[in-house]
């Protein structure tokens, strides 16, 4: 920033000099040149008269008279030339005023028009929290005093600024992606975590986080990239429970029950080997999902229909006629189930084409986004639907939405009807 102000000051001074230089030159040149010219004309005319007298064309009395007349004219012209209190002084004052006004006007224009209104707050934030962010990226935790007066968006702004200056900082991209995930910003999180993984592909945390965000953005199902990432982590660390959880449950939701059984059995063995007693919900979900995956795998081999996963929420979605023409059949339809009182991250998501409306789907544990928190584990949920014009699960201007409907889950199935009638 200091370098910027140095260049700005130099530019302002040069601009002032360009404007003031012609004024300064005009102060001295005209008066001085006129005096010199009058004296030269006097000497030349006197020399001509003296030559005429020496050659006999005029006499001495005539020469004296003409000389006196020339001297009188010269004195008159010198008395009439501009002095220090005339236009020259005014031009000098104008020159000095120009040298002061041009930098002042430039500074006023910058602060009034060019400089952002929040520039002062931004520099204060950098001074107060910038060193703390640097320490955090080097592995040192932040103190309560350092985080008391700042928010997660403040932290994200500083990370973005740092990564603009140091774009190859893998840990910075990783923390930026995790911060986006905490704000439920899926697409920016995926972009940041992809950068982190590409800069440090052998770091399991980066590969695991990148695979997780891709699975969340794909209705909890695996794609080729997320499967490759998780399998790569397991090659380096065969007992990595996070990779086993994501790969096992992701394969289950993708209909790959053979892989689901293999991974979930390895996860069960790894948890038993270390005597895992926490996360009772995960233990119960693991057992139920593994049993259902085995049942479905056996049924597929024998040709029988598998048993139902769990009580489901039957959701019927239609769109109001007033919104006809506000969307295209290829727009993306998202159906969400969120905890009525809890974090904004969806418990379950189904993605369809808007051209399929009206439609009826069932939300159950097979669409759960988080294995440790299945849909059936929350008693009260809110079910909503949205047509995304941009294909992103995050709300965007122009999206079409239905009002969320609360549902209390019980022993039997529940039915919900959603009508998309609001333009965001």
Image (cartoon, rainbow, N blue to C red):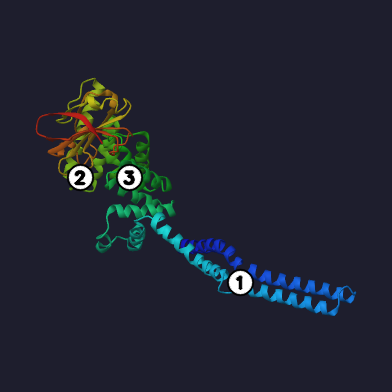
Q: Position of residue 97 (x, y in %)?
A: 49, 67
Rounded to the nearest whole Å, what is the CA distance between mark 3 and mark 2? 19 Å
Q: Quick check: marks 3 and 2 in contact, CB under 8 Å?
A: no
- Which sits in the foreground, 371 or 170? 170
Q: Circle 1: is it few (<14), some (14-19), or many (20+) Cα within 10 Å?
A: some
User: Helix, strand, or loop for circle 2?
Assistant: loop
Q: Which residue is mark 3?
A: 209
Measured as percent of width and height from the top left, residue 319 is found at: 22, 26
**Which badge, 2 or 1, comes first in the chain's sequence?**
1
Q: Residue furthest top?
A: 303
- Residue 76 vertical position relative to residue 98 in the rendered view, above or below: below
Label 1 SS: loop
Residue drawn at (84%, 79%), measured in percent from left and top? 60
Front position among marks 3 and 1? 1
Crowding near pointer 3: few (<14 within 10 Å), some, many (20+)? Answer: many
Reply above or below: 91 against 348: below
Q: Nearer the viewer, mark 2 or mark 1?
A: 1
Residue 320 x, y percent position in the rendering: 21, 26
Mark 3 or mark 2: which is in front?
2
Residue 202 appears left or right of 155: right
Earlier-in-chain disc, 3 versus 1:
1
Instruction: Name the disc covering residue 82, or none.
Output: 1
Quadrant of the drawing holding the N terminus: bottom left
Calculate the distance from the C-alpha at mark 3 to the C-alpha at mark 1: 83 Å
Instruction: Name the residue: 30% across, 30% down.
Output: 332
Rendered residue at 24%/38% (across/down): 369
Residue 171 appears in the rendering: no
Q: Quadrant of the C terminus?
A: top left
Q: Is residue 236 left or right of residue 343?
A: right
According to the picture, the residue beneath numbered tag 2 turns out to be 343
């Amino acid at each position: 920033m200091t370098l910027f102000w140095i260049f700005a000051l130099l530019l302002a001074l040069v601009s002032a000099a360009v404007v003031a230089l012609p004024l300064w030159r005009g102060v001295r040149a005209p008066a001085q040149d006129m005096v010199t010219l009058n004296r030269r004309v006097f000497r030349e005319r006197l020399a001509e008269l003296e030559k005429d007298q020496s050659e006999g064309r005029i006499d001495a009395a005539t020469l004296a008279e003409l000389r006196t007349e020339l001297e009188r004219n010269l004195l008159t012209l010198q008395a009439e030339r501009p002095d220090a209190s005339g236009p020259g002084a005014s031009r000098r004052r104008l020159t000095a005023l120009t040298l002061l006004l041009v930098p002042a006007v430039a500074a006023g224009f910058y602060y009034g028009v060019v400089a952002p209104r929040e520039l002062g707050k931004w520099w204060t934030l950098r001074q107060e929290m910038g060193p703390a962010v640097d320490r955090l990226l080097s592995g040192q935790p932040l103190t309560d005093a350092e985080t008391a007066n700042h928010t997660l968006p403040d932290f994200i702004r500083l990370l973005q600024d740092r990564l603009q200056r140091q774009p190859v900082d893998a840990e910075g991209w990783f923390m930026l992606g995790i911060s986006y995930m905490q704000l439920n910003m899926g697409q920016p999180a995926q972009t940041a975590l992809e950068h982190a993984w590409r800069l440090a592909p052998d770091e399991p945390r980066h590969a695991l986080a990148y695979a997780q965000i891709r699975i969340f953005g794909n209705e909890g199902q695996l794609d080729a990239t997320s499967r490759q990432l998780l399998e790569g982590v397991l090659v380096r660390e065969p007992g990595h429970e996070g990779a086993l959880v994501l790969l096992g449950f992701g394969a289950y939701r993708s209909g790959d029950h053979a892989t689901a059984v293999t991974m979930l059995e390895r996860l069960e063995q790894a948890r038993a080997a270390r005597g895992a007693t926490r996360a009772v919900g995960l233990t119960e979900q693991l057992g139920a999902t593994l049993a259902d995956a085995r049942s479905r795998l056996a049924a597929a081999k024998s040709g029988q229909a598998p048993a139902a996963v769990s009580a489901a929420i039957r959701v019927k979605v239609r769109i109001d006629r007033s919104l006809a023409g506000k969307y295209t059949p290829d727009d993306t339809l998202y159906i969400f189930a969120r905890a009525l009182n809890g974090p904004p991250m969806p418990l379950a998501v189904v993605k369809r084409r808007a051209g399929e409306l009206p439609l009826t789907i069932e939300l159950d544990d097979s669409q759960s986004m988080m294995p440790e928190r299945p849909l059936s584990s929350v008693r009260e949920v809110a079910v909503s639907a949205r047509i995304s014009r941009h294909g992103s699960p995050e709300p965007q201007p122009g999206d079409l939405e239905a009002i969320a409907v609360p549902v209390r889950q019980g022993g039997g199935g529940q039915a919900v009807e959603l009508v998309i009638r609001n333009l965001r």
